[in-house]
Image (tube, rainbow, N blue to C red):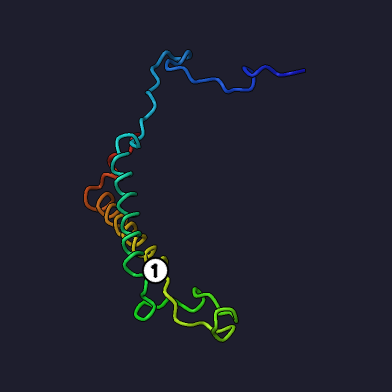
């Protein structure tokens, strides 16, 4: 009644084909392990940009105002008129925009360079 586990798992492809005895090329390695330091460094850099921007713009409500929908409504417990929105400071939104813009600009430059300048996106693809 119970199906053995060996019948469920797919068979692995041998490196040599039994029909024609031709060598099957080995799998193409990915570059994640080669770039782990750059990926980690970029992540740490963007996190530092976010934290520094967030820290230095704590009281930025007078010169860097977000849209009213991003500010919480006042309540009667606040001592202000209920249902109104006063100028608020949202440094988290601006810090996210700054760190996202840095990453998007980096991706744009890398894409432009690899597609149009070095053409490595077309030439380096394994066939």
Residue 93, placed above or below residue 44: below
Q: Residue at x 33, y 34 (%)?
A: 33
Which of the 4 image quadrants contains residue 91? bottom left
Which of the 4 image quadrants contains residue 83? bottom right
**Residue 80 in picture, x, y percent from top left:** 54, 84
In the rendered structure, the answer to whether residue 126 lies left or right of residue 83 reads: left
Q: Residue at x 48, y 14 (%)?
A: 19
- Residue closer to the observer: 11 or 74: 74
The local secondary structure at tag 1 comes to helix
**Residue 66 in picture, x, y percent from top left:** 43, 76
**Residue 27 in picture, x, y percent from top left:** 39, 27
> In which quadrant will I find the C terminus?
top left
> In which quadrant will I find the N terminus?
top right
Residue 88, placed above or below residue 120: below
Residue labelled with disc 1: 91
**Residue 110 in picture, x, y percent from top left:** 28, 52
Q: Residue at x 44, y 81 (%)?
A: 87
Q: Residue furthest right?
A: 1
Give the crowd class for mark 1: few <14, some 14-19, many >=20 residues within 10 Å: many
Q: Residue furthest left?
A: 117
């Amino acid at each position: 009644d119970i199906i053995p586990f060996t019948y469920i798992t797919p068979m692995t492809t041998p490196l040599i084909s039994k029909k024609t005895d031709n060598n099957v090329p080995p799998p193409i390695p990915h570059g994640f392990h080669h770039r782990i330091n750059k990926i980690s460094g970029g992540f740490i850099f963007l996190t530092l940009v976010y934290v520094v921007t967030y820290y230095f713009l704590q009281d930025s409500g007078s010169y860097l105002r977000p849209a009213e929908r991003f500010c919480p409504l006042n309540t009667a417990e606040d001592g202000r008129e209920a249902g109104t929105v006063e100028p608020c400071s949202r440094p988290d939104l601006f810090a996210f925009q700054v760190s996202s813009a840095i990453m998007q600009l980096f991706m744009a430059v890398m894409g432009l360079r690899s597609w149009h300048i070095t053409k490595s996106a077309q030439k380096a693809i394994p066939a």
